[in-house]
Amino acid sequence: MKQSIYLALLLLALLPAGCQKNKTAVTALKIEMQENPEGVATTNPRFSWQITSGTPDLVQQSYQIQVARTEDDLKRGHNLVWDSGVVESDLSLLIPYEGDDLLSRGAYYWRVKVTCNHDETAWSDIHHWSMALLNQSEWQAAWIGEDALSNPGETASENTRLAARYLRKPFTANKKVTRAMLYISGLGSYEAYLNGKRVSEDVFAPMVSWYPERVYYNVYDVTSLLQKNENLLGVKLGNGRFFGMRGDDTQMFGLPRLLAQLEIEYSDGSTDMIVSDNSWKVTSRGPIIANNEFDGEEYDARLEMERWNRSDFDERNWVEADIMDAPAGELTAQSNPNMRVME
Protein backbone atom coordinates (compact mmCIF):
# COMPACT_ATOMS: atom_id res chain seq x y z
CA MET A 1 0.00 0.00 0.00
CA LYS A 2 2.75 2.42 0.97
CA GLN A 3 4.64 1.61 -2.22
CA SER A 4 1.56 2.49 -4.27
CA ILE A 5 1.24 5.88 -2.53
CA TYR A 6 4.92 6.66 -3.02
CA LEU A 7 4.69 5.69 -6.70
CA ALA A 8 1.63 7.91 -7.22
CA LEU A 9 3.38 10.88 -5.61
CA LEU A 10 6.48 10.28 -7.72
CA LEU A 11 4.44 10.19 -10.93
CA LEU A 12 2.64 13.41 -9.96
CA ALA A 13 5.95 15.14 -9.38
CA LEU A 14 7.23 13.99 -12.76
CA LEU A 15 4.18 15.16 -14.72
CA PRO A 16 4.85 18.00 -17.15
CA ALA A 17 3.90 21.41 -15.81
CA GLY A 18 1.18 21.66 -18.44
CA CYS A 19 -0.66 18.75 -16.76
CA GLN A 20 -0.74 20.31 -13.29
CA LYS A 21 -3.82 22.20 -12.22
CA ASN A 22 -3.52 26.03 -12.04
CA LYS A 23 0.06 25.87 -13.24
CA THR A 24 0.09 29.51 -14.36
CA ALA A 25 -1.31 32.37 -12.31
CA VAL A 26 -1.18 36.15 -12.05
CA THR A 27 0.21 37.36 -8.70
CA ALA A 28 1.82 40.38 -6.99
CA LEU A 29 -0.78 42.86 -8.26
CA LYS A 30 0.22 46.47 -7.67
CA ILE A 31 -1.15 49.95 -8.31
CA GLU A 32 1.49 52.67 -8.63
CA MET A 33 4.01 50.08 -7.38
CA GLN A 34 2.06 49.48 -4.14
CA GLU A 35 -0.24 46.68 -3.04
CA ASN A 36 -3.78 47.90 -2.29
CA PRO A 37 -2.78 51.54 -1.71
CA GLU A 38 -5.03 54.11 -0.05
CA GLY A 39 -5.09 57.71 -1.25
CA VAL A 40 -3.84 57.51 -4.84
CA ALA A 41 -3.63 61.03 -6.26
CA THR A 42 -3.02 60.35 -9.95
CA THR A 43 -6.14 60.03 -12.09
CA ASN A 44 -4.41 57.55 -14.40
CA PRO A 45 -2.89 55.04 -11.96
CA ARG A 46 -0.68 52.30 -13.40
CA PHE A 47 -1.15 48.55 -13.01
CA SER A 48 1.59 45.95 -12.59
CA TRP A 49 1.66 42.19 -11.96
CA GLN A 50 3.82 39.08 -12.09
CA ILE A 51 3.22 35.62 -13.52
CA THR A 52 4.03 32.42 -11.64
CA SER A 53 4.27 29.10 -13.48
CA GLY A 54 6.00 25.77 -13.52
CA THR A 55 6.23 25.93 -17.31
CA PRO A 56 9.62 26.90 -18.76
CA ASP A 57 10.02 29.53 -21.52
CA LEU A 58 6.70 31.16 -20.63
CA VAL A 59 5.91 34.42 -22.44
CA GLN A 60 2.88 36.64 -21.91
CA GLN A 61 1.07 37.33 -25.16
CA SER A 62 -1.94 39.39 -23.99
CA TYR A 63 -3.67 40.76 -20.91
CA GLN A 64 -7.12 41.94 -19.85
CA ILE A 65 -7.77 44.30 -16.91
CA GLN A 66 -11.17 44.97 -15.36
CA VAL A 67 -12.03 47.68 -12.80
CA ALA A 68 -15.29 48.27 -10.89
CA ARG A 69 -16.59 50.36 -8.00
CA THR A 70 -17.60 47.30 -5.95
CA GLU A 71 -16.15 43.85 -5.51
CA ASP A 72 -19.50 42.27 -6.36
CA ASP A 73 -19.77 44.16 -9.67
CA LEU A 74 -16.26 43.06 -10.57
CA LYS A 75 -16.99 39.40 -9.83
CA ARG A 76 -20.09 39.54 -12.03
CA GLY A 77 -18.44 41.65 -14.72
CA HIS A 78 -21.20 44.29 -14.44
CA ASN A 79 -21.04 48.09 -14.20
CA LEU A 80 -17.33 48.13 -14.98
CA VAL A 81 -15.60 51.51 -15.04
CA TRP A 82 -12.92 50.02 -17.27
CA ASP A 83 -12.52 46.84 -19.25
CA SER A 84 -9.32 46.98 -21.26
CA GLY A 85 -10.46 44.12 -23.47
CA VAL A 86 -7.83 41.68 -24.65
CA VAL A 87 -4.67 43.67 -25.34
CA GLU A 88 -1.97 41.93 -27.36
CA SER A 89 1.14 42.77 -25.34
CA ASP A 90 3.88 41.21 -23.25
CA LEU A 91 3.92 44.25 -20.93
CA SER A 92 3.10 43.66 -17.26
CA LEU A 93 4.53 46.82 -15.67
CA LEU A 94 2.97 50.27 -15.28
CA ILE A 95 -0.02 49.80 -17.59
CA PRO A 96 -2.00 53.10 -17.34
CA TYR A 97 -5.68 53.21 -16.47
CA GLU A 98 -7.85 54.31 -19.41
CA GLY A 99 -11.40 54.02 -18.11
CA ASP A 100 -14.07 56.37 -16.79
CA ASP A 101 -12.96 59.37 -14.74
CA LEU A 102 -11.93 58.27 -11.26
CA LEU A 103 -13.78 59.95 -8.42
CA SER A 104 -12.24 61.78 -5.51
CA ARG A 105 -12.30 59.50 -2.43
CA GLY A 106 -13.53 56.63 -4.62
CA ALA A 107 -12.85 52.98 -3.82
CA TYR A 108 -12.00 50.74 -6.77
CA TYR A 109 -11.50 47.00 -7.28
CA TRP A 110 -9.50 45.37 -10.06
CA ARG A 111 -8.35 42.06 -11.49
CA VAL A 112 -6.31 40.88 -14.44
CA LYS A 113 -5.83 37.73 -16.49
CA VAL A 114 -3.23 36.96 -19.13
CA THR A 115 -2.73 34.65 -22.06
CA CYS A 116 0.70 33.08 -22.45
CA ASN A 117 2.30 31.07 -25.21
CA HIS A 118 1.31 27.86 -23.39
CA ASP A 119 -2.05 28.65 -21.79
CA GLU A 120 -4.41 31.24 -20.32
CA THR A 121 -4.69 32.08 -16.63
CA ALA A 122 -7.83 32.43 -14.61
CA TRP A 123 -8.73 35.86 -13.25
CA SER A 124 -6.34 36.98 -10.53
CA ASP A 125 -7.42 37.57 -6.96
CA ILE A 126 -9.26 40.88 -6.59
CA HIS A 127 -7.20 43.82 -5.36
CA HIS A 128 -8.27 47.36 -4.58
CA TRP A 129 -7.19 50.96 -4.18
CA SER A 130 -8.78 54.24 -3.12
CA MET A 131 -8.41 57.76 -4.43
CA ALA A 132 -7.16 60.75 -2.50
CA LEU A 133 -8.97 64.07 -2.11
CA LEU A 134 -8.42 65.34 -5.64
CA ASN A 135 -9.51 68.94 -5.00
CA GLN A 136 -8.18 71.23 -2.28
CA SER A 137 -11.73 72.56 -1.76
CA GLU A 138 -12.76 69.16 -0.36
CA TRP A 139 -10.76 69.77 2.80
CA GLN A 140 -13.09 70.94 5.55
CA ALA A 141 -10.55 70.51 8.35
CA ALA A 142 -8.42 73.28 9.87
CA TRP A 143 -4.83 73.11 11.07
CA ILE A 144 -4.83 72.96 14.88
CA GLY A 145 -2.36 72.61 17.74
CA GLU A 146 -1.10 74.42 20.82
CA ASP A 147 0.21 77.80 19.73
CA ALA A 148 2.46 78.40 22.73
CA LEU A 149 5.54 77.21 24.62
CA SER A 150 3.82 76.38 27.90
CA ASN A 151 6.21 73.99 29.66
CA PRO A 152 9.30 74.84 31.74
CA GLY A 153 12.50 74.91 29.73
CA GLU A 154 10.89 74.96 26.29
CA THR A 155 12.69 77.10 23.73
CA ALA A 156 12.56 77.79 20.01
CA SER A 157 16.13 79.12 19.80
CA GLU A 158 19.60 77.60 20.06
CA ASN A 159 19.08 73.99 21.17
CA THR A 160 15.35 73.81 20.59
CA ARG A 161 13.23 72.03 23.16
CA LEU A 162 9.53 71.26 22.96
CA ALA A 163 7.15 68.70 24.46
CA ALA A 164 4.90 66.52 22.34
CA ARG A 165 1.33 67.67 21.79
CA TYR A 166 -1.60 65.34 22.48
CA LEU A 167 -4.92 66.03 20.77
CA ARG A 168 -8.28 64.29 21.07
CA LYS A 169 -11.77 64.47 19.66
CA PRO A 170 -14.73 62.38 20.93
CA PHE A 171 -17.58 61.63 18.53
CA THR A 172 -20.47 59.22 18.11
CA ALA A 173 -21.31 56.77 15.33
CA ASN A 174 -24.73 55.34 16.16
CA LYS A 175 -25.48 53.71 12.80
CA LYS A 176 -23.94 50.82 10.91
CA VAL A 177 -20.68 51.98 9.33
CA THR A 178 -19.81 50.72 5.85
CA ARG A 179 -16.64 52.74 5.28
CA ALA A 180 -14.48 55.18 7.22
CA MET A 181 -11.44 56.94 5.76
CA LEU A 182 -8.97 59.12 7.64
CA TYR A 183 -7.11 61.85 5.74
CA ILE A 184 -4.38 63.21 7.99
CA SER A 185 -1.18 65.23 8.19
CA GLY A 186 0.68 65.99 11.41
CA LEU A 187 3.76 68.21 11.29
CA GLY A 188 6.48 67.36 12.02
CA SER A 189 5.46 63.72 12.82
CA TYR A 190 2.31 62.13 14.20
CA GLU A 191 0.83 58.93 15.59
CA ALA A 192 -2.94 58.57 15.19
CA TYR A 193 -5.23 56.42 17.34
CA LEU A 194 -8.86 55.45 17.05
CA ASN A 195 -10.39 54.12 20.26
CA GLY A 196 -6.94 53.48 21.69
CA LYS A 197 -5.59 51.55 18.69
CA ARG A 198 -2.96 52.81 16.27
CA VAL A 199 -4.44 53.41 12.83
CA SER A 200 -1.25 52.08 11.22
CA GLU A 201 2.25 50.81 11.90
CA ASP A 202 3.80 53.83 10.17
CA VAL A 203 6.50 55.83 11.97
CA PHE A 204 7.76 59.36 11.29
CA ALA A 205 4.71 60.06 9.15
CA PRO A 206 4.19 61.99 6.99
CA MET A 207 7.30 61.96 4.83
CA VAL A 208 9.64 64.90 5.34
CA SER A 209 9.39 67.57 2.66
CA TRP A 210 10.45 71.14 2.01
CA TYR A 211 7.42 72.55 3.81
CA PRO A 212 7.31 75.96 2.06
CA GLU A 213 6.66 74.10 -1.20
CA ARG A 214 4.91 70.80 -0.33
CA VAL A 215 3.19 69.15 2.63
CA TYR A 216 2.23 65.49 2.50
CA TYR A 217 -0.85 63.83 3.97
CA ASN A 218 -1.68 60.14 4.46
CA VAL A 219 -4.88 58.17 3.93
CA TYR A 220 -6.01 55.22 6.07
CA ASP A 221 -9.03 52.93 5.98
CA VAL A 222 -10.13 52.86 9.63
CA THR A 223 -13.50 51.16 9.18
CA SER A 224 -12.55 48.21 11.39
CA LEU A 225 -11.51 50.50 14.28
CA LEU A 226 -14.82 52.31 14.66
CA GLN A 227 -17.20 51.10 17.34
CA LYS A 228 -20.89 51.67 17.91
CA ASN A 229 -21.82 54.91 19.69
CA GLU A 230 -18.86 56.46 21.55
CA ASN A 231 -15.56 56.88 19.68
CA LEU A 232 -12.35 58.81 20.21
CA LEU A 233 -9.86 60.03 17.62
CA GLY A 234 -6.52 60.86 19.24
CA VAL A 235 -3.25 62.13 17.79
CA LYS A 236 0.23 62.48 19.24
CA LEU A 237 2.31 65.24 17.59
CA GLY A 238 6.10 65.27 17.59
CA ASN A 239 8.44 67.95 16.30
CA GLY A 240 10.02 66.05 13.43
CA ARG A 241 11.71 68.41 10.99
CA PHE A 242 8.98 71.05 11.20
CA PHE A 243 9.92 72.51 14.58
CA GLY A 244 13.61 72.98 13.82
CA MET A 245 16.53 71.34 15.62
CA ARG A 246 19.63 72.94 17.15
CA GLY A 247 18.55 76.50 16.46
CA ASP A 248 18.85 76.46 12.66
CA ASP A 249 16.59 79.35 11.65
CA THR A 250 16.44 78.15 8.04
CA GLN A 251 14.84 74.91 9.26
CA MET A 252 12.33 76.44 11.70
CA PHE A 253 8.85 76.33 10.18
CA GLY A 254 6.73 76.69 13.31
CA LEU A 255 5.11 74.81 16.16
CA PRO A 256 3.64 71.35 15.49
CA ARG A 257 0.16 71.27 13.95
CA LEU A 258 -2.45 68.76 12.87
CA LEU A 259 -4.84 68.46 9.93
CA ALA A 260 -7.33 65.57 10.19
CA GLN A 261 -10.52 64.69 8.34
CA LEU A 262 -12.38 61.47 9.16
CA GLU A 263 -15.13 60.68 6.65
CA ILE A 264 -17.71 58.06 7.63
CA GLU A 265 -20.25 56.36 5.35
CA TYR A 266 -23.26 54.56 6.86
CA SER A 267 -25.32 51.68 5.52
CA ASP A 268 -28.38 53.92 5.08
CA GLY A 269 -26.45 56.13 2.63
CA SER A 270 -25.82 59.00 5.04
CA THR A 271 -22.37 60.34 5.83
CA ASP A 272 -20.56 62.10 8.63
CA MET A 273 -17.34 64.06 8.82
CA ILE A 274 -15.08 64.59 11.85
CA VAL A 275 -12.62 67.40 11.20
CA SER A 276 -9.83 69.07 13.14
CA ASP A 277 -11.08 72.39 14.54
CA ASN A 278 -11.18 74.26 17.84
CA SER A 279 -13.67 71.77 19.31
CA TRP A 280 -10.70 69.42 19.82
CA LYS A 281 -8.81 69.41 23.12
CA VAL A 282 -5.03 69.59 23.42
CA THR A 283 -2.31 69.29 26.06
CA SER A 284 1.48 69.30 26.05
CA ARG A 285 1.69 68.09 29.67
CA GLY A 286 2.11 64.43 28.72
CA PRO A 287 5.05 62.08 29.34
CA ILE A 288 7.05 63.10 26.23
CA ILE A 289 8.58 66.25 27.68
CA ALA A 290 11.04 66.84 24.83
CA ASN A 291 11.72 65.34 21.42
CA ASN A 292 13.68 65.93 18.25
CA GLU A 293 15.50 63.87 15.67
CA PHE A 294 18.97 64.82 16.93
CA ASP A 295 18.54 64.32 20.67
CA GLY A 296 15.84 61.68 20.71
CA GLU A 297 13.01 61.68 23.23
CA GLU A 298 12.74 62.42 26.95
CA TYR A 299 9.96 60.46 28.61
CA ASP A 300 8.70 61.16 32.13
CA ALA A 301 6.61 58.16 33.19
CA ARG A 302 5.19 60.15 36.11
CA LEU A 303 3.19 62.16 33.58
CA GLU A 304 1.59 59.21 31.83
CA MET A 305 -2.07 59.75 30.94
CA GLU A 306 -3.69 56.36 31.01
CA ARG A 307 -6.40 55.94 28.35
CA TRP A 308 -5.88 59.47 26.99
CA ASN A 309 -6.80 58.12 23.55
CA ARG A 310 -10.08 56.53 24.65
CA SER A 311 -13.51 58.06 25.03
CA ASP A 312 -13.78 57.53 28.81
CA PHE A 313 -10.75 59.71 29.63
CA ASP A 314 -11.27 62.80 31.80
CA GLU A 315 -10.10 65.72 29.64
CA ARG A 316 -11.10 68.58 31.97
CA ASN A 317 -7.47 69.66 32.41
CA TRP A 318 -6.96 69.87 28.65
CA VAL A 319 -7.54 73.12 26.77
CA GLU A 320 -9.26 74.08 23.54
CA ALA A 321 -7.04 73.54 20.49
CA ASP A 322 -5.70 76.62 18.75
CA ILE A 323 -6.35 77.25 15.07
CA MET A 324 -2.92 77.36 13.41
CA ASP A 325 -1.80 78.87 10.13
CA ALA A 326 -1.66 76.44 7.24
CA PRO A 327 1.86 75.64 6.01
CA ALA A 328 2.79 77.43 2.81
CA GLY A 329 3.41 74.26 0.80
CA GLU A 330 0.84 72.54 -1.41
CA LEU A 331 -1.08 69.83 0.42
CA THR A 332 -0.39 66.59 -1.47
CA ALA A 333 -1.29 62.94 -0.99
CA GLN A 334 1.89 61.04 -0.20
CA SER A 335 2.66 58.65 -3.05
CA ASN A 336 5.12 56.36 -1.27
CA PRO A 337 4.76 54.19 1.85
CA ASN A 338 5.93 55.53 5.20
CA MET A 339 8.71 53.94 7.22
CA ARG A 340 7.87 51.03 9.54
CA VAL A 341 9.78 49.16 12.22
CA MET A 342 10.98 45.93 10.62
CA GLU A 343 13.07 44.47 13.48
Image (spheres, helix red, strand yellow):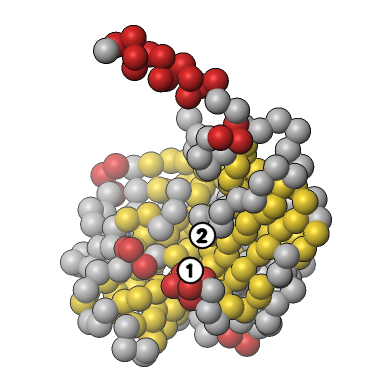
**Residue that protrudes farthest toward the top in the picture:** 3
In the displayed structure image, the side of residue 195 where residue 326 appears, left or right:
right
- Circle 2 residue: 126
Left or right side of 210 for 125: left
The x and y percentages for residue 211 are 71, 63
Query: Can I make out residue 230 in this image?
Result: yes
The image quadrant of residue 185 is bottom right
- Please provide percent x and percent y for residue 158: 65, 48
Q: Name the residue under label 1.
A: 75
Name the N-terminal-most of marks 1 and 2: 1
Q: Where is residue 1 in the image (x, y as percent from the top left)?
A: 27, 12
256 or 261: nearer the viewer: 261
Depth check: 224 or 327 in front?
Answer: 224
- Using the image as rendered, state which of residue 214 and residue 222 is in the foreground: 222
Disc 1 secondary structure class: helix
Disc 1: CA contacts within 10 A as few (<14), some (14-19) or many (>=20): some
**What crowding class fits label 2: few (fewer than 14 Cα within 10 Å), some (14-19), or many (20 or more)?**
some
Q: Where is residue 40 in the image (x, y as percent from the top left)?
A: 63, 67
Q: Are marks 1 and 2 in contact (CB under 8 Å)?
A: yes
Figure check: 1 above or below 91: above
Question: Residue shown at 66%/64% (left/top)?
Answer: 65
Label 2 sits on a secondary structure element that is loop
Amino acid on which the number 2 mark rests in the picture: Ile
Residue positioned 39% across, 74% down in the render:
179
Q: How far apart are marks 1 and 2 (CA)?
A: 9 Å
Mark 1 or 2: in front is 1
